[in-house]
Every structure is written in C-alpha cells, then in structure tokens.
Image: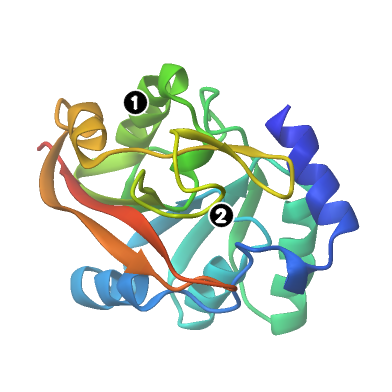
Amino acid sequence: MIKDQMDEIYSNIPLEEIPWNMETPPDLLKKIIDTHLDKSSKIIELGCGAGNYVIYFAGKGLDITGVDISSKAIDIAKNSAKENGVSCNLFVCDALNDMTELSDNYDFVYDWELLHHIFPEDREKYINNVCRLLKPGGLYLSVSFSELSPQFGGKGIYRKTPLDTVLYFSSESEISELVKPHFKVLELKTVEIPGKHAPHKAIYTLLKKQE
C-alpha cells in the first residue's frame, strides 16, 4: 500500500509541493558526515525519495547509494543525478524485504524521516536489515516524528496526513527499546527539525553497530 501511495504522490504532485522533499540536506546530517566520515566511506540512505540528499553528497565526491520503495521517485532521482552530472547508486528497494540486492559493508546508514512510515510490528525486521547492511562499528542515524510534535492533530501515535498517508509518532523510550539490542547509543534526543512549512519535533538517534 505504501508503495502505491508514494508512486501516486511522486507521479501527481510537483516536487516543490511534497512536504518532505527538501533540496539540501539538514545541517544535522551534514555535520555527522563531515565529522565521522571521509571519501573512502560507503554511505546509504534508506527512503531517499527524489534523491536530493544522495545527489548533494555525491556531488561532494562521496560514495553514496540511495534506495526507495517508489519506482517513480527513483526515476526522478536518476534523472536528477544525470542532470547534475554526479555518480551515485540508486535502487528501487523495499526496506522491509531482505534487500539482498544491496551489499553489507556500509560505513554509514541513515534514514531521514522514514521510520515514522514503518509501524511497530515491522520495525524489528527493519532494524535487523539496517544492522546487516552496516560494517561492525558502522554508524546509523534515524530521525523520525516524535509523539510530542504538534503536526496532524497534535495527539495520538497514528496520525493521518493531508496526503492520506498514516504516520506513527514515537517516544524516546520506544526508540531506545527498539535499537539497544543491536547498537551502542551515541545520542538519542528530541530535536526541532526545520520543515518546508513549519518546524516539528523529531527523535534524533545516532547509533554505532556493535563490533
């Protein structure tokens, strides 16, 4: 269902009107890459959408891959990469499947506002996939809507958006319980994230895979 919804969104809504489609990466993400990684590092973004962040970092000379469940989004991303003259890997991929088409030696995996599309019953599968993709000692960043955020009615853990998608709003303790069996927690906190229309509260989680 989410694949059909995303294909419809990327087919029928101009990119500048899609709320999460931001042209350049957030400062928090750029800071992690500048601080912890170099041009020999392998990076993958899960849920890359139209590929803006992947293309930005590829333009900086980084080895980066982007995957998204929407084939339409990946088509847009590939065209954009070509127009910008950058080299990056872009795949249609469901992060809840085995993702066998991807290698398992990334230094950094990140999802920027993807996890709130994944409901609790599927999150263990997803986190296991993330863990498999990472090298021992590799870093994982996840940023997703906090239950404290006022968006889409301001209460309840399941909230329907104007685009007819349903998002799951998490607590810090819930995210902590999800990730601790697999990772060392470097940072786990609620932060304010600039949005296209308004800022919102998100749970920012920076983790290191157990060595």
Say which mark, if any, is on residue 85.
Answer: none
Residue 160 locus on image (x, y percent): 63, 39
Tag 1 secondary structure: helix
Judging depth in this view, the residue of 175 and 146 nearest the camera is 146
Residue 195 locus on image (x, y percent): 51, 70
Judging depth in this view, the residue of 48 and 210 nearest the camera is 48
Residue 53 seen in the figure: yes
Residue 127 locus on image (x, y percent): 35, 30
Judging depth in this view, the residue of 118 and 64 nearest the camera is 118
Q: Residue at point 40% right, 53% down?
A: 149
Q: Residue 134's image quarter? A: top left
Q: Residues within 10 Å of mark 1 (few under 14, many from 20)?
A: some
Say which mark, if any, is on residue 66.
Answer: 2
Q: How is the image coloured?
A: rainbow
Calculate the distance from the C-alpha at mark 1 to the C-alpha at mark 2: 18 Å
Tag 2 secondary structure: strand
The relative height of residue 20 versus residue 203 in the rendered view (above or below) is below
Residue 161 locus on image (x, y percent): 65, 46
Image quarter where the C terminus lies is top left
**Left or right relative to 114: residue 67:** right
**Left or right relative to 154: residue 178:** left
Residue type indicated by callout 1: Asn
Q: Residue at point 59% right, 48% down?
A: 67
Residue type indicated by callout 2: Gly
Q: Which residue position is annotated with label 1?
A: 128
**Left or right relative to 16: residue 182:** left
Image quarter where the N terminus lies is top right
Residue 102 seen in the figure: no
